[in-house]
Image (tube, coloured by chain):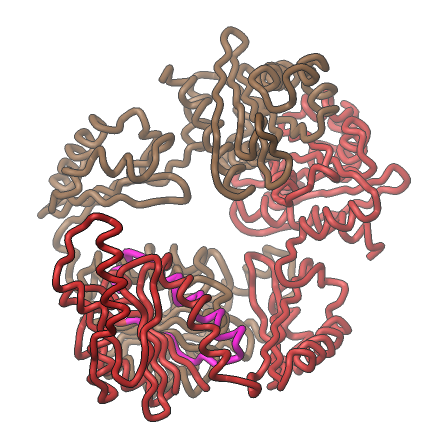
Chain colours: A brown, B red
Amino acid sequence: MRAEILSVGTELLLGDIVDTNAVALSRAMVELGIPLTHRVTVGDNRERLLDALRAAASRADLILTTGGLGPTPDDLTKEGIAEAFGDRLVEDPAAADELRAFFARRGVPFAANNLKQALVFESGFALPNPHGTAPGAVLEKDGLTAICLPGPPREMLPMLENHVVPYLRRRLGQTTQALHSKFLRLVGIGESSASERVAELQESENPTVAPILRGMEPSFRITARAEDRETALAMVEEMEARIRERVGEFVYGVDTDTLESVLVREMAARDLTLATAESCTGGLVGHRITNVPGSSAVFHGGVVSYANAAKQSLLGVKPETLESRGAVSEETAGEMAEGARQHLGASVGVAVTGVAGPGGGTPEKPVGLVYMAVTDGDGIRIERHKFGGAREDIKARSAQAALNLVRKRLLNL
Amino acid sequence: MRAEILSVGTELLLGDIVDTNAVALSRAMVELGIPLTHRVTVGDNRERLLDALRAAASRADLILTTGGLGPTPDDLTKEGIAEAFGDRLVEDPAAADELRAFFARRGVPFAANNLKQALVFESGFALPNPHGTAPGAVLEKDGLTAICLPGPPREMLPMLENHVVPYLRRRLGQTTQALHSKFLRLVGIGESSASERVAELQESENPTVAPILRGMEPSFRITARAEDRETALAMVEEMEARIRERVGEFVYGVDTDTLESVLVREMAARDLTLATAESCTGGLVGHRITNVPGSSAVFHGGVVSYANAAKQSLLGVKPETLESRGAVSEETAGEMAEGARQHLGASVGVAVTGVAGPGGGTPEKPVGLVYMAVTDGDGIRIERHKFGGAREDIKARSAQAALNLVRKRLLNL
């Protein structure tokens, strides 16, 4: 099998968006061992799409497309494939039902042009899309396989992982070998430092150890291949132990864990509750915690004290502290954390205050200076950070460090 | 002139790096008004490079390449272009001197294979590279222009801006066609409904109207091509007016506007201030508002009242309201909004309360039911929504609708 990737969308050619889908698809081909020789991008143009499809089919027997599956007349990918390779589009009843249900759940009227999205190849089948309206579509015809995936990465990536990779593994007959992967998720260390510490483990061929960046979090993916699942699991476990010897204190979780989900789980297990006081993060810490299903058992709530008046009235920060030390200071962070804990009746309080920029920096308190504090009423722990980047980066790094501060407090790290 | 971009490098096909160069080159073509119809990526493979070059020359008269200019045998781009288009490579004395000087400055011995980088086309010239060792190279032959740029973005981007764009502007002379694009950003309407309402405008060939989804927000991109910039601007403006006739009430902004940036701008212009009371969104509304630089002029802060106790103590929601109507109700939403406004001393308060799921739903109050309220102390406006999707989708849609509610209140929509 030999693959070619075709990205479809005028917005790509205009440089409006970066084609991260092509990167994810390329990596998937590497993992599957399918040679990939070309990636091609064309706009929403019928003639050029047809030419690109025919050229791809002359070089490859697996064509992966992204984009052009939506309801508008601009969305041409499936139509183009049917035309180029002599197949017909037919309505998939399950996909049509799912589409109607999707709109009903949102209480949105169902426009007729949406049904275009439920069309699949006569010589093929649909791939479900729980994250959007356009299902994927696979064509299998005359030795050619074409797989049409949606353009939005939040729809494309789960479809790739949950449907396309397993489908191709079956096609390649890779199912006889057990393959097991595990992700270790790290916080509080940079990607290159983490990578350096486990450098010689990354030389290993089976299991493999690959550094993966998820957002700002370094991760390691361990992948073992063996005759059976038990052996693969044991190989992964042994490699995990070796990695943890080197960077264990930074490993907050595995696989689909998020820092906030680990925090909620650990606090629930210890019968602890949490309150937040956020200044520069503006609510991001609370947002992340409440992304965790069941977080209401742990999270009492928080105060976003953007104005100084709110720090005083809702958190009980002393006017003289704000006066003498300033809003961005160790002392204010500490009083905010304790205020949140008390005012919201939680056992643990965490606070963040800093300068997110781009304005508001001074020589003493530059953009990126952030204080954070965690308290359980007995002891208080304060950290000072200096983050770089744009406003949203500084907010994101501050929230990450604040959540990590609570984690370190819980684990006495 | 018609352009094609060719990215050369096996590391691209392995998904090791994201091709941001292609994005920068695409944008440069938009700015120059040079139509770009294809982007192609091939690895460091002579045959496939030659094929891709010949295919590009059959479709375009300007070929832009990135990558493959280094000193190793893998670096084949200039050699491939010379072979495909019948030119010769010759040493550029200035480039060779610059190369030797570059190594001398770094105190690194000069290996002979480096001189390969000083080769340029006989029918062309070099482009200086102050940030690396490989100069760029331009071929002008038989009506074809090929421009070879280095792969590392820190070398490619300055070369593009300082040499390639000015060179192409000169080449295009007075006949430059101006291309102008504008995005209209919509809220409160689905992509397909919006698309249906402007269906016949999407048939237009110049300006073109294309629907683009940014996150959950439908957008339309209007692109006009004309002899000069003023005409293109006027054409875009006229089309914008026609779109606004059909979906104007949903258009919250243009181009890089975000819903929150428009809100902060409009409130600042009206001397209004804002406070938030968030239950199911957990801080996301505050997070989005504080993503806007300068939002502190408008945003006083908020309360994340996840627990009922917090709704009472920090927002003054009446216990009997919570008792008789429940936390997820019109009445609680209204009291939360008014409480936020008063307790945080703002002129406008906005509140969200709902069931984000996956647990906590009942037949009367199912997952996805969300109430939101906005008040300025004089009047209160309440909305009830039923959102579908996973927990994070419901949070995201709730925050979007809450920001839109404030917008509609401001604009009396």
- The residues colored magenta run B13-41
Question: Vertical placement of A258 versus A54: above or below?
Answer: above
In terms of depth relative to the viewer, which is nearer, A60 or B123?
B123
Which quarter of the rendered picture does the C terminus of chain A lie within?
Answer: top left
Residue at 17% from the left image edge and 45% from the top image edge? A208
Q: Residue at the top extreme? A: A378
Q: Residue at the bottom extreme? A: B142
Q: Is residue B411 magenta?
A: no
**Residue B321 position within the rendered picture, expressed as x and y whole percent measured from the top left:** 78, 28
Q: Residue at the right extreme? A: B378
Residue B357 makes an appearance in the image? yes
Question: Vertical placement of A261 versus A154: above or below?
Answer: above
* Left or right, B19 with reference to A402: left
Residue at 46% from the left image edge and 78% from the top image edge? B168
**Residue A340 position within the rendered picture, expressed as x and y whole percent measured from the top left:** 62, 19
Residue at 25% from the left image edge and 58% from the top image edge? B101
**Residue A261 position within the rendered picture, expressed as x and y whole percent measured from the top left:** 44, 32
Residue at 73% from the left image edge and 43% from the top image edge? B372
In terms of depth relative to the viewer, which is nearer, B248 or B379?
B248
Question: Vertical placement of B38 versus B118: above or below?
Answer: below
* Left or right, A9 with reference to B306: left
**Residue A275 position within the rendered picture, expressed as x and y whole percent measured from the top left:** 58, 22
Which quarter of the rendered picture does the N terminus of chain A lie within?
Answer: bottom left
Q: Is residue B20 magenta?
A: yes
**Total number of numbered discs in the rendering:** 0
* Left or right, A235 with reference to B303: left
Q: Residue at the left extreme? A: A227
Residue A347 lies in what quarter of the image? top right
Residue A345 makes an appearance in the image? no
